[in-house]
Amino acid sequence: MTARNNSTFELTIIGGGIVGLATCLQAIRKQPRVRIAIVEKEPAIARHQSGHNSGVIHSGIYYKPGSLKATNCVTGAQRMVEFCREHSIPFEICGKVVVATDDSERAGLGELMRRGTANGVPGLKMISVEQLREMEPHCTGIAAMHVPGTGITDYTRVAQKYAELIQAAGGEILTGYQVRGIVRNSSEIVLETNRGTIKASRIINCAGLHSDRIMRLSGEDSALRIVPFRGEYYEIVPARRHLVRNLIYPVADPRFPFLGVHFTRRITGGIEAGPNAVLALKREGYRKTDFNVRDAVETAVFPGFWRMAVKYWRSGVGEYYRSLSKQGFTHALQKLLPEIQAADLEPAGAGVRAQALDRTGRLLDDFVIVRSKQIIHVCNVPSPAATASLVIGEQIVEMLS
Ligand SMILES: Cc1cc2nc3c(=O)[nH]c(=O)nc-3n(C[C@H](O)[C@H](O)[C@H](O)COP(=O)(O)OP(=O)(O)OC[C@H]3O[C@@H](n4cnc5c(N)ncnc54)[C@H](O)[C@@H]3O)c2cc1C
């Protein structure tokens, strides 16, 4: 869509993913008369992380109590369910199990229970091996936790509904506009795009995998780099779907901000296995062979990258092995579901996570949103940001005032 008449807005949001759209929606709800636009480089919204994810409405068991992820996820999940209900978007609260498969994982499972309880996640329960078998008859483990409030939905549908509501309220969604330069004057900001300039009094940077670049274009550097981690999925062939009823997760490695390969029932049908977490050599690289010189060099020259590589090289090698070897991927899944075989799995696409890394080599765990004079930069909003999008949007809008 092109700009209607003149290209001057009070507020412009860069990025038409679920976070940019939710923020725009909340801004319009708060100030219905504000002249507002979203600028999105792709021909349609939700083409990147927001359209390539697991579709889980997370409950909030993983996050450190008091963190933005914890508070936003618990409230955000309730708000997401209400939103889906109100707008007839398919969703289901199917619950999930988190399963320890050996003694070394018992402490981690206990920690998830502690965090979930501290975060106010309702209905959490440690369950016996027999109860696990009743819920997921083909799953094996030595201890498990049931999270009854976890759900599934389709975040592309959610994003489309946000967009519809924005347009119905007079907001503009300018697709096919790539921001290439940012000039700041005392009274306004000029966005230089491939289709001319757009002026705005204030900007919100929700550019996901490119948010650090947008920040640098605006003349600021947060000392963070977005490092892309591809998450690859397999789908269980129809004849073997009965092996999984709902969602089955391992106990995640607490040192790593990813959840480990798991099984997810999709609201659109079918069961997915994955995603893994492989360092990608292209920010929007969905295939194993995708490579972009600028993306790869920017990652490699960032000092934090080598510090991260030293810290996590063992996990990284394991992830590459499971990416290149279907047998290796299957082997990881068999810890949870011994009956699953490589022949039961078909490749099912990938998503790429925008994960912020700092100079010390730390993968930032929490959401990071930074406010400067006329611009708010959404620097790190990985999972569960789709779940929490409405609440994140509300918080960003509050930061404007
Ligand atoms: C594999 C995977 C599984 C996940 N599973 C879940 C899950 O089950 N539940 C959950 O809650 N979360 C999940 N997430 C996380 C969730 O999808 C993301 O946190 C969320 O989609 C982030 O939204 P966003 O709007 O910030 O980013 P994006 O959706 O990536 O949107 C950013 C947008 O900015 C645009 N853009 C970038 N640069 C420019 C520019 N220069 N000019 C104009 N536009 C630009 C891009 O084209 C893009 O559309 C998952 C993520 C991945 C990758």
Image: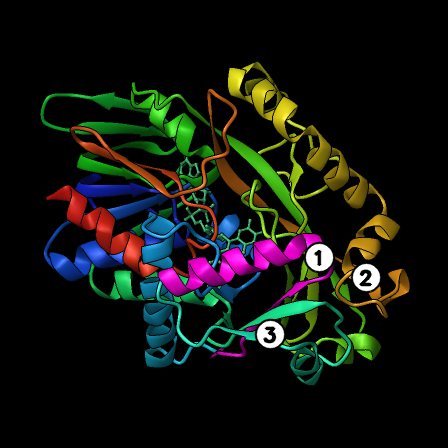
Disc marking residue 334: 2
- Highlighted range, magenta: 91-118
**Is 233 displayed left or right of 175 in the figure?**
right
The part of the image, by quadrant, that contains residue 384 is bottom left
Q: Choose between 167 and 204: the one closer to the eye.
A: 204
Q: Residue at x 45, y 33 (%)?
A: 210
Residue 77: within the magenta?
no
Circles 3 and 2 in contact, beta carbons < 8 Å: no
Residue type for callout 3: Thr
Q: Which residue is mark 1?
A: 103
Question: Residue 214's spot in the image, x, y percent?
Answer: 37, 29
User: In front: mark 3 or mark 1?
Assistant: 1
Disc marking residue 268: 3
Q: Residue at x 50, y 77 (%)?
A: 148
Q: Residues within 10 Å of mark 3 (few under 14, many from 20)?
A: few
Under circle 3, the secondary element is loop
Question: Residue 138's spot in the image, x, y percent?
Answer: 78, 77
